[in-house]
Amino acid sequence: MLLISTLTCPKCGGVATETMPTNACQFFYDCRHCAAVLRPLTGDCCVFCSYADVPCPPIQDAREAGSDASCCTR
């Protein structure tokens, strides 16, 4: 399981490496570069699923188990 992911801000293109939470979905993220508040895209429940290079831990678990993963459980 990978817990480090790189988020890319869709507003300014700023990049930040973050540690993903393992016990909850992260719904909001404040861009370090432009202060935009990122929210998940429609169909995603966390900012890592929408804007990062590594999906959130629940998606990683589901993919490893071979099940369909729509996104984090709520």
Image (spheres, rainbow, N blue to C red):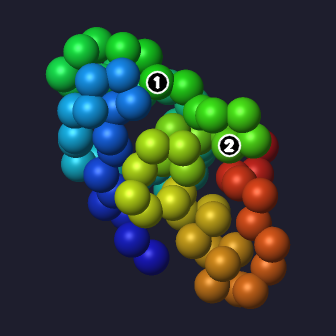
| Label at residue 44 | 2
Q: Please name the amino acid that badge 2 sits on.
A: Asp
Q: Mark 1 points at which residue?
A: 38
Q: Which residue is drawn at 39% across and 71% down?
A: 2
Q: Quadrant of the N terminus?
A: bottom left
How many other residues sit within 10 Å of disc 2, few (<14), some (14-19) or many (≥20)? Answer: some
Q: Please name the amino acid that badge 1 sits on.
A: Leu
Q: Is mark 1 on a helix, strand or loop?
A: strand
How many other residues sit within 10 Å of disc 1, few (<14), some (14-19) or many (≥20)? Answer: some
Q: In this view, does 40 lie to the left or right of 10?
A: right
Mark 2 or 1, nearer chain start: 1
Residue sticking out furthest to the top: 35
Q: How many labels does the image show?
A: 2
Q: In this view, does 59 lie to the left or right of 12?
A: right
The percent position of residue 63, horizontal first and vertical second, equals 66, 78
The percent position of residue 4, horizontal first and vertical second, equals 31, 60
Establish if 71 lies above or below 12: below
The percent position of residue 64, horizontal first and vertical second, equals 63, 84
| Label at residue 61 | none
Q: Is mark 2 on a helix, strand or loop?
A: loop
Q: Do the residues labelled 2 and 1 touch (CB within 8 Å)?
A: no
Q: Residue at x 51, y 60 (%)?
A: 55
